[in-house]
Image (tube, rainbow, N blue to C red):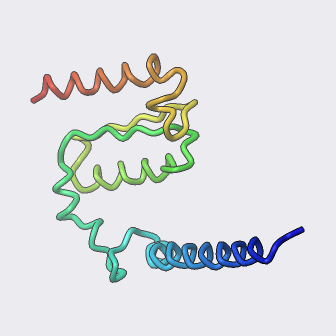
Amino acid sequence: MVTLRATRFAAVFVALSALLAFGVTAQTSPGILKGTVVDKDGHDSYLTPENARRLALPITFVTGALNQIFDPETVARTYRWVVEHNGATHYAQHLFERYAHMDLFIGRDAATDVYPFLADWLERQGRMA
């Protein structure tokens, strides 16, 4: 039998969940509607040529093909954006086919598949410095 206390708890839980969902939606919906990341006032103040120039440094974009947190297409789009603004000299990208989000770091085969790739990249950057 459901008690009055459990019913009140459930009602409060549902109300808090709705408020939380509304807050997250209110925070992210301007960017979703514009199709880009925006500041608190809804302005596209992040993806500017000036900010792109600040990223003219060695970056390798790595992701897993199964990553559902940072979609591989979004990572590729970011790569294309920095290359478009700064040229390809500083950038590379690599897609690990059998990997999801954290698999790149704690996956069963990360030590043999991912770590050598990252170590080699870091070593090459040290030689270029």
Q: Is residue 89 visible?
A: no
Horizontal side of residue 77 vs 107, given as left or right: left
* The N terminus sits in image quarter: bottom right
- Given residues 57 and 8, the one toward you in this image is 8
Q: Position of residue 67 (x, y in %)?
A: 54, 43
Q: Position of residue 8 (x, y in %)?
A: 72, 78
Q: Is residue 87 visible?
A: yes
- Residue 45 drawn above or below residue 106: below
Residue at horizontal 37 percent and vertical 19 percent from the top: 116
Horizontal side of residue 15 vs 44, given as left or right: right
Horizontal side of residue 27 vs 79, given as left or right: right
Residue at horizontal 16 percent and vertical 55 percent from the top: 54
Horizontal side of residue 50 vs 113, given as left or right: left
- Given residues 25 and 114, the one toward you in this image is 25
Residue farthest right in this picture: 1
- Residue 33 drawn above or below residue 99: below
Count of number-bearing discs = 0
* The C terminus sits in image quarter: top left
- Given residues 112 and 18, the one toward you in this image is 18
Residue at horizontal 53 percent and vertical 75 percent from the top: 25
Residue farthest left in this picture: 129
Q: Position of residue 111 (x, y in %)?
A: 44, 19
